[in-house]
Image (cartoon, grey):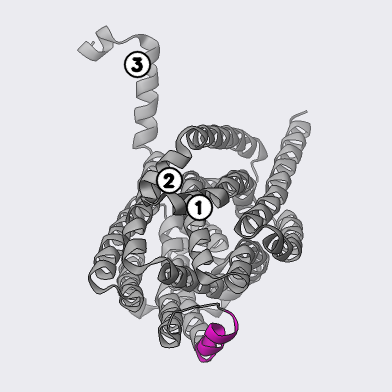
């Protein structure tokens, strides 16, 4: 018996050994890696934001926020595709040597689909850059050429960023999330600290955006190398596989169409804000939205690690129900903890972070609602990863269609009536629909599993 065994109570010793066992398991390592990556990905942009905001000014920061929005809207091509491909790559990789060769062929084919789609979409949007600035944005005193240049940078950023999604999907499917999070965290530091330095020295929004484009290109090439390095054969020995693409495309396209509605629904508020209000108001809204999304990312590492596990569980509903029960309790604990911290110290921390009392008050009025929205979205994600793992489209269809109709109908009315807070309130209403759908599905799933056991 070791000194540890002699002096530590049996229950504490058993708990320690259980935690050590989880930490040494692949799932445990992936969860911890995902948390590390999510903390870096959420914390670095938030830490450097006040410095970039000071260097560029509120109005130019609004232009950066709109550029990010343009990239998000253009990336709707990938909405749903990446999640559904986790299922396709993961199931093939688990099937032995033949399945891993099939994975490599699928990667080769989808790699070309993603790069061609990125180029095609970029070339389609490029001619409308001037139209977007002239007829959509309220740029105020921003020079027209700078606003158009920001749109060009956004299109370039989309082109180099979209293909990274397929490589990251492969690495997630192979449960290589430790390596992937290390790479993403490194480039997040580069984009955050390097972008802050460029913005501070140059004071130019275009120089800042150009640096981000270059950094994202390097990140895409790095994850591409990592994905191919793990394949059983080199890229040069493979060719286009029509059969593999056809076998996966039907479900992937169906999921994409459904998730596009979901993603577009979450962007409707910012689209209306960018068209109805001055661009500096979009900057304020984007700060609050970034904070709320940072909080939301607390749950993402768990969902990212659990999704491949749900794919492996397949039709074992009893095991799925047990895992969902634990996941839902963990999510509830996270929401309650974050909510209490924000209620007690949120506004104080916000003022210290932004170093601007007036701006902090403006952001807080929006953030209060967006924090509620993030909590509801976290609940929704418990059911969502189950739907993805089971190729369940019926529930996803109902939730996304209803949410999209609500978003389009109530968001402009809310903004006209209450400004930025109206946009945030509309988003809360939309996410309430999603969370209710998730709870209803989980309850139905639990009842059906109980009947099977009887």
- Residues under labels 3 and 2: Cα distance? 41 Å
Pointer 1 residue: 363
Residue 320, quarter of the rendered image: top right
Camera-near label (3 vs 2) is 2
| Disc 1 to disc 3: CB gap under 8 Å | no
Task: Please state the horizontal and vertical placement of residue 80, each as a whole percent of the image.
Answer: 59, 64
Vertical relation: 241 (above or below) 81: below
In the visual, does 353 lie left or right of 91?
Answer: left
Q: Residue at x 55, y 78 (%)?
A: 137
Q: Secondary structure at mark 2?
A: helix
| Disc 3 to disc 2: CB gap under 8 Å | no
- The magenta stretch is 125-136
Q: Secondary structure at mark 1?
A: helix
Q: From where the camera sits, is residue 35 visible?
A: no
- The label on residue 186 is none
Residue 367 sits inside the magenta stretch: no
In the visual, does 174 lie left or right of 282?
Answer: left
Nearest to the observer: residue 374 or residue 304: 374
Vertical relation: 190 (above or below) 158: above
Of the 4 image quadrants, the one containing the N terminus is top left
In the visual, does 65 lie left or right of 183?
Answer: right
Q: Residue at x 27, y 62 (%)?
A: 190
Of the 4 image quadrants, the one containing the C terminus is top right
Vertical relation: 230 (above or below) 71: above
Task: Please state the horizontal and vertical placement of residue 117, each as a whole percent of the image.
Answer: 51, 81
| Disc 1 to disc 2: CB gap under 8 Å | yes
Task: Please state the horizontal and vertical placement of residue 286, each as a whole percent of the image.
Answer: 50, 61
Pointer 3 residue: 13
In the visual, does 3 lie left or right of 90?
Answer: left
**Dot 3 alpha-carbon crowd within 10 angstroms: few under 14, some 14 to 19, many 20 or more:** some
Q: Residue at x 63, y 45 (%)?
A: 376
């Amino acid at each position: 018996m070791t000194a540890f065994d002699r002096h530590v109570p049996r229950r504490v010793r058993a708990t320690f050994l259980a935690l050590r066992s989880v930490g040494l398991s692949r799932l445990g390592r992936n969860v911890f890696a995902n948390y590390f990556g999510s903390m870096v990905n959420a914390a670095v942009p938030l830490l450097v934001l006040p410095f970039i905001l000071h260097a560029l000014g509120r109005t130019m920061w609004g232009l950066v926020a709109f550029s990010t929005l343009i990239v998000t809207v253009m990336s709707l091509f990938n909405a749903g595709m990446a999640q559904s491909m986790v299922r396709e790559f993961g199931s093939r990789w688990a099937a032995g040597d033949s399945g891993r060769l099939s994975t490599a062929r699928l990667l080769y084919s989808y790699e070309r689909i993603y790069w061609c789609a990125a180029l095609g979409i970029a070339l389609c949007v490029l001619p409308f850059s001037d139209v977007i600035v002239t007829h959509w944005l309220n740029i105020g005193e921003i020079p027209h050429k700078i606003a158009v240049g920001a749109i060009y940078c956004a299109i370039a950023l989309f082109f180099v960023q979209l293909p990274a999604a397929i490589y990251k999907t492969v690495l997630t499917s192979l449960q290589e999330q430790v390596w992937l999070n290390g790479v993403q965290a490194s480039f997040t530091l580069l984009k955050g600290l390097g972008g802050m330095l460029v913005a501070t020295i140059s004071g130019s929004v275009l120089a800042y955006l150009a640096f981000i484009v270059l950094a994202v290109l390097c990140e895409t090439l790095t994850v591409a190398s990592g994905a191919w390095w793990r394949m059983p054969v080199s890229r040069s020995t493979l060719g286009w596989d029509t059969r593999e693409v056809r076998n996966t495309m039907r479900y992937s396209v169906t999921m994409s169409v459904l998730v596009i509605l979901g993603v577009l629904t979450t962007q409707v508020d910012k689209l209306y804000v960018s068209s109805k209000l001055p661009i500096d108001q979009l900057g304020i809204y984007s700060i609050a939205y970034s904070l709320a999304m940072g909080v939301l990312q607390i749950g993402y590492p768990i969902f990212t690690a659990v999704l491949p596990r749900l794919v492996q569980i397949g039709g074992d509903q009893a095991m799925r129900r047990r895992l969902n029960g634990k996941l839902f309790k963990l999510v509830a604990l996270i929401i309650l903890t974050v909510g209490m911290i924000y209620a007690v110290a949120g506004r104080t921390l916000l003022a210290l972070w932004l170093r601007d009392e007036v701006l902090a008050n403006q952001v807080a009025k929006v953030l209060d609602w967006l924090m509620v929205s993030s909590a509801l979205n976290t609940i929704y994600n418990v059911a969502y990863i189950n739907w993805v793992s089971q190729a369940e489209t019926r529930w996803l269809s109902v939730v996304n269609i209803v949410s999209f109709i609500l978003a389009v109908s109530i968001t402009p009315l809310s903004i006209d009536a209450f400004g930025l807070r109206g946009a945030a309130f509309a988003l809360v209403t939309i996410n309430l629909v999603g969370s209710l759908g998730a709870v209803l599905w989980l309850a139905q799933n639990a009842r059906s599993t109980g009947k099977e056991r009887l």
